[in-house]
Image (cartoon, helix red, strand yellow):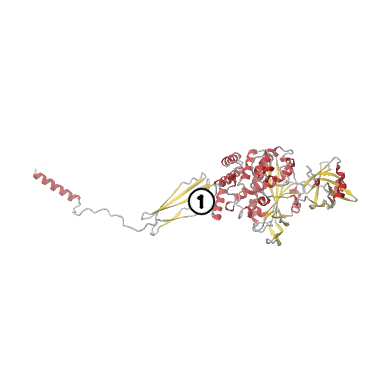
Amino acid sequence: MGLQRIASVILTILLVVGCGGGSSSPETPTPEPTPTSDTTPPTIVIKGPPTVYHEVGTTYYDEGAEYSDNSGETPSSSAQSNVNENVMGTYSVIYTATDAAGNQSSVTRNVVVTGLSFVEFFNFTRDTLGVNKRNFRDSYIKAIEAYIYAEEALKIEDYSNARTIVENVFQEQPLYDNLWRNGVSDFGLHNGDPIAYYGLRMIDKITQELPLTETGVLQLTAIIVECSQVTRPINTSYDLETVNISVDDRLLADDYQALREATYLFREWVKAITQGLSVNLEIHRQDECTTTSFNRNESAGYLTSYPNTSEIISRVPDEIAQETNIWLVISPSGVQGDGTGYPYWITGGMGLTPKGTPLIIGDDLWFIRKPVHLGDGEWTPVERRVYHPQWFQHEFMHHIYRTWPEYQLEITGHDWFDRSFWPSDFEGRWEPDFYWESIEKRLMEANPSLAEGIDITDWVGADINEIGFDALLGNYERQPVGNPWHEVEIVKIGDSFYWTNAAGQQWLLYADEDKLMTNSAYGIQEIIIRLSSAGEIDALYFNGEPYVRLQASSSLNLLAQVLQQNLQNHVTEQQEMKIFHCYHSDEHNWDLAEIIGHYH
């Protein structure tokens, strides 16, 4: 037993020695990492901007990042992305780096997948204004995105999708809600006031009516005057200079892209409200220079700068003029810079040609840069697409209201800025609401229809030498008669012929070549003679408005007596060029200082 135990111990000792590899040294412990003072994480520098705007539906290629470490060695790195190129939204690419000391850092790039229009818009706001999409108010983004995407749906005739977009945004942000005005002047941008609201209401009407079979074609003729001799102030003491200015090349660029962007939605809206009259944009360049005058209305607090529109229109070839339903005159701007340091500049509005067709007036810079009261810098394409349709609508509604005066929707000019003026059945709070209600609750059932009243071209007037002055004799009315100036009789006194009215005015009529002219209270004016199909005079167009010939005899033969009693009367109702100077504001019961601006 004792020998057996001894043998077992010896065997155990031999096995242990054999397992030790022939060495009797003790086991070496695992070394600990060498202590280090490096606690600085690696540096990651994103290539390109930290926020990227990417067009939906296109392949996204990330620019990556550069990695470095204070040790001089390149750290290990990785990048993780959740970008879905086919779904709009905000995604991230996360870059991570780890150095030999175990220090780790990470940096994130935001990738906003959006429509192409907003790629360009937000690249501009990021690079020029230092403003990213996340810096905008949610209501602002919802409004402009709804407008742009709905407008783009219209352009491909996807009326159903356009309507869905508008319905959705009006569910999220109800009509008449103050949300529509939140941030209206943020960052020097201007996308309408309320934001995109006018255009969305226009699209709402368009998708309510379209698609429609085309029932005819209206022509919007844009005359771009290439040069003007401009009189303008050089300081706020209103010392004047006269300079020759050429049209801004940016208006002409890319086949007049700015003008096409500005007018697109307006043209679609006119088609909708006329139940099918398409509107073609005809651009006519006029190389003859014009003159642009300056006027200061000190009491009202604004300045005006207008070209000689009568001269401009008269130069247009007959073949264009006789196809034109709506005129747009654009001439070199008479505004100093963006208007900074001056009161409000008014450079446009709604007038009438001598033959009664609507005449919209603007200047070249109105389509290129924002006047100071509307923001800073040039219009971006998004801003121009959102804002300018509301300007065109505003001007054109003046023409509609005066063409259908029986509805009394505009009496003294811009009456709707006072909410108490609105008919009792009208809903809403802002100007575009008034327009919507006007169309829906009055004008869609007008007689004559909107299509009939707007589809009037610049007809050819009669030659006064061919018909003779005696053919003018008789009574005329501007209908409906609003004041004594609208009741007219053409009379002969001795060998001379006179325009007389019940207000006691008498103006000599004379011929200038083939034109009938008068030196009136409104200045020297051409009176256009319109003949019926039977070749008889049925109206005289004075100051752009028709004075219809009365077939029956009237009491106007008393005018001669009135004239003798009232020759001392002075003009009390002059209206400069029959132009509506266009202001705009946001609430009701405004004073002039509050409402001037927003348009011109």
Q: Secondary structure at mark 1?
A: strand
Q: Is residue 474 left or right of residue 2?
A: right
Residue 508 rendering spot, x and y as whole percentages: 85, 52
Q: Quadrant of residue 408?
A: top right
Tell me what residue is drawn at x 13 percent, y 47 percent: 9
Q: How many marks?
A: 1
> Would residue 263 be seen by someone viewing this image from the given angle?
no
Q: Is residue 198 left or right of residue 314?
A: left
Q: Residue furthest right?
A: 494
Q: Is residue 476 left or right of residue 455?
A: right
- Report which residue position mark 1 lands on: 52
Q: Residue furthest left?
A: 2
In this orientation, which residue lies closer to the viewer: 420 or 341?
A: 420
Give the vertical position of 442 relative to 306 (above or below): above
Q: Residue furthest top?
A: 445
Residue 48 rendering spot, x and y as whole percentages: 49, 54
Residue 378 rendering spot, x and y as whole percentages: 61, 54
Residue 269 rendering spot, x and y as whole percentages: 66, 43
Q: Quadrant of the image for the N terminus?
A: top left
Q: Is residue 71 left or right of residue 594?
A: left
In this orientation, which residue lies closer to the viewer: 312 or 556?
A: 556
In this orientation, which residue lies closer to the viewer: 163 or 343?
A: 343
Density class for disc 1 (Cα within 10 Å; few <14, some 14-19, many ≥20) is: many
Q: Which amino acid type corresponds to the residue marked 1 in the rendered image?
A: Val
> Would residue 266 be seen by someone viewing this image from the given angle?
yes
